[in-house]
Image (cartoon, rainbow, N blue to C red):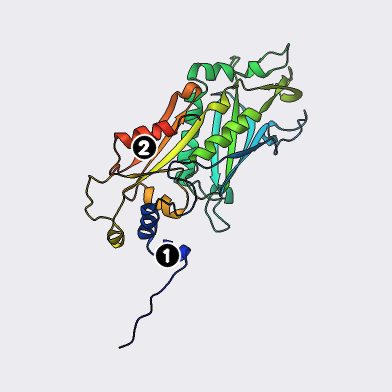
Amino acid sequence: MTNMEPITYPSEVFSRLVPDLYLHRHLNQGLRPATNRSFTQHRKLNHFLGGLKKPVGSDEKAASLVWGSSLIQADGMSIVCGITGSVSEEEGGIFVNVEVLRGANGSSAAMGGPPSDEEQVVSRKTTDLLKKGIFNSKENKQFFELQNFLKEGQQDEAVFDAGQHQKRYLCLHANVTVLSRNGPVQDYVWAAVLAALKDTEIPLMEIDEDTGRITLTNDFTTIPVDDIDIHSSRSFGFVKPKPEADAYEDDEMDISEDSNCVLLADVQGEVEQAATSSTREGSRLQIVRGRGDKLIGFSFVGKGTGVGLNEIKTALDLSKTE
């Protein structure tokens, strides 16, 4: 009888063949598959400001200018954000658009394809958080009135054919491009947008009395968000632990509700992403805080298997500003 030799796979192959077993072998030893960070530690974030700014000239179009920018990098994450402006007759504010690069064959909006569900969800959530956490609805509309961004002595005399006077508003567009990623991007998109807004200089404008055309000047104003750097977003994943022998079994198997879940701060790598996704038995939690650690946003997605009050309290404590 021929003896069967054991088959050995590299870790990157093993993790794809039996991801559950690969993950839980690491967790049982107090390790994480894709990083040396502890279970409760977030990645160190590096940010750079102003690299995309272009000089302002009165003969250039506002839509082609970058008024503020940032680059966020953190162990496998690389995200760029540029701030541009436009004028609207309907509503002013800050609007976020997220594009995730997925290679030459990807269907991301950046490659000419339609936006993915993730891109739409992250864009909407970030825009909503900005409105709630920085400007409430009344202050938002008043601050972004075009009148506030005209040179001294200018007035917004927007008169249309019908003879009606209508206010106009400034819109800031935060265009975010995720260049590389190895985990959920919401926290890092939030950080990139806030950093870019802090770097933003809005050029004051002049309106031609005859044509109504708006031109930009070489004078600038900024967004009054001096406390912007204390707003933070922290995400966590929850994984239901399994005995090693059970890691081969089907995901629909019955698991005891008594076993506690494992909290993973700042999910990283394909294995952790899959284990904490809502399509599996995992869950994810996002916590956004503002001045004085005030809770601005709280989002929990998943089946919640094994997640109790103690785990939620631990995540809330870890989300506070250090």
Please say whether residue 158 is visible from this viewpoint.
no
Q: Report the front residue among 11 and 284.
A: 11
Q: Quadrant of residue 161?
A: top right
> Which one is nearer the viewer's eye here, 105 or 58?
105
Seen as rendered, the residue at the extreme front is 29
94 above or below 300? above
Question: Which secondary structure lies at badge 2?
Answer: strand
- The structure residue drawn at horizontal position 58% and vertical position 51%, both measured from the top left corner, is 111
Residue under label 1, please give it.
14
Q: What label does residue 300 carry, if any?
A: 2
Dot placed on the residue nearer the N-terminal end, 2 or 1? 1
The kind of residue tagged 1 is: Phe
Residue type marked 2: Phe
Could one spot residue 106 in this view of the protein?
yes
The picture quadrant where one finds residue 8 is bottom left
Quadrant for the N terminus in the image = bottom left
